[in-house]
Image: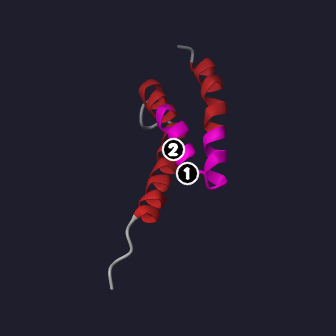
Amino acid sequence: MNSDACDEVTELPCAIGFLERSTGRLVEARRILEPLHDDRYGVYGPDDEDTMEITDVLARIRLTLDDTHREAPET
């Protein structure tokens, strides 16, 4: 696959995923970004700048969702 074409194909989903995250729609952002990350990882590898950015954003989303869904400790 031509890397320029791949960049164009992944640009919109990436922007949508980042927009969802910025508006607090973390589950939707994760749903969009996870398959995009898998695709970019497979094509460009883990050292690609955009792949690393998506990896970082997904890690932050997961941490936030994990913190949100933890049960409050019993007192």
Which label sits on residue 26? 1
Please report the bounds of the magenta region as a residue range: 16-35
Q: Is residue 36 above or below residue 17?
A: above
Q: Nearer the viewer, residue 32 or 44?
A: 32
Q: Residue furthest left?
A: 74
Which label sits on residue 38? none
Q: Residue at x 62, y 18 (%)?
A: 5
Q: Residue at x 55, y 51 (%)?
A: 26
Q: Residue furthest top?
A: 1
Residue 3 as seen in the image, left or right of residue 39: right
Residue designated by label 2: 30
Q: Main secondary structure of the magenta part?
A: helix
Q: Quadrant of residue 38?
A: top left
User: What is the three-letter code of the residue carrying label 1?
Assistant: Leu
Residue 47, percent from left and from top: 44, 38
Q: Is residue 46 above or below residue 62?
A: above
Residue 31, percent from left and from top: 51, 39
User: What is the three-letter code of the residue carrying label 2?
Assistant: Arg
Q: Are marks 2 and 1 in contact (CB under 8 Å)?
A: yes
Residue 12, percent from left and from top: 67, 31
Q: Is residue 22 magenta?
A: yes
